[in-house]
Every structure is written in structure tokens, then in C-alpha cells.
Image: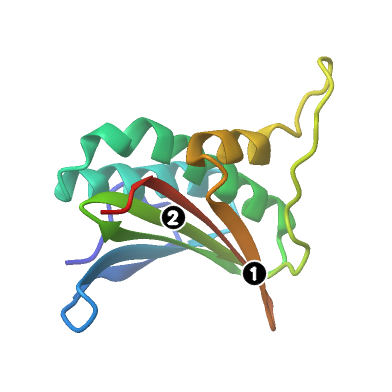
Amino acid sequence: MAFTAGMPPGAEPLAAAATAASGTESAGVDLPYRAESVSAARSLVRVQLAAWGLDHLVDDAQVIVSELATNASKTGCRLRMRVEIERLGANAVQIRVTDGCRVLPVMVEAGREALGGRGIALVHYLTGGHWGADQLPDGKIVHAELGAVA
């Protein structure tokens, strides 16, 4: 079944997939570099976590995917970003956002008066430091793990 709820025009759903060989489940969507894509990313995470019975992760997961998708949407390096969520275990998921910019995110200490710059620090806090980024030949993938892997 493909995820379509809350997707902006130009979004391309990726079929939710259960991979029997590895026992993993995942879902994802390709989204255009638009502000409304962040809302679609949150919807994907909310809907998929509910389907997996992981409602207790929804609030933190939506904050994490919002931060990652917002950062990706600001790069504008490609036509689309990819947002994915994968179930890692009974109570754990990984959220991934892939974009076409090779600049890796860094955690900075934003001053009290700063209007931004707290997103990656928030992701770091919510994941207990279980996040990272990998360069790809044509961009990067930023990933964050949430919940306890069983």
C-alpha cells in the first residue's frame, strides 16, 4: 500500500514495504523542495508509526522528521528529497532524509537571541545521540534512531 495522506502536489509515494528476508518494515516518500513537504513528512511518520502500533514514538518522531526535512528543503539541491522510516525492532525506528546537498549537518550551540540553529541539537537530544549523516556521491542521507532496539 502506498502512502498518500497529506502529500503535496509533485510528491511520489514509495510503497510501504515489508522485507521478508531481513524482517524489516519501511515506508517512504519522495517530496519536492517545498515548505508543505515538511507536513507530508510528519504525516508519513505519524501514519506509519500508528500502523506499527508505536504511537508512543509519534511526538518525538514528528519533531525529528520536521527538523531533518526542513534542513533538506532549504538546500534545494535536487528536485526531490526522500523521507523514509524503517522499523528496527519492536520499539525502535530509524528516520532517514536524503537530499542532493553534500554538506553535512553539524550541531551548533545557538545563542539565546538566535532565530534558528537548534534543530540538530534537538534531534541529538531526542535520539540520545543516535543520529548521523553519510555523504553520498550525489548528496547525503541524515538518519536518526528513536526508541529502544530489542
The crowd level at tag 1 (other Cα within 10 Å; few <14, some 14-19, many 20+) is some
Residue 95 - label? 2
Q: Amino acid at mark 2?
A: Ile
- Residue 82 pos. (x, y %): 49, 65
Residue situated in front as seen by the camera: 63 or 10: 63
Secondary structure at badge 1 equals: strand
Type of colouring = rainbow
Height in image: 2 above or below 108?
A: below
- The percent coordinates of residue 130 (x first, y second) are 53, 50
Name which residue lies at 31% across and 50% down. 92
> The C terminus lies in which quarter of the figure?
bottom left
Distance from Cα at disc 1 to Cα at disc 2:
14 Å
Q: Nearer the viewer, residue 48 or 43?
A: 48
Marks 1,2: beta carbons within 8 A: no
Q: Which residue is mark 1?
A: 134
Amino acid type of the residue that numbered disc 1 sits on in the rendered structure: Asp
Say whether disc 1 or disc 2 marks the residue closer to the N-terminus. 2
**Drawn side of residue 112 relative to residue 87, left or right:** right
Q: Position of residue 60 (x, y in %)?
A: 42, 34
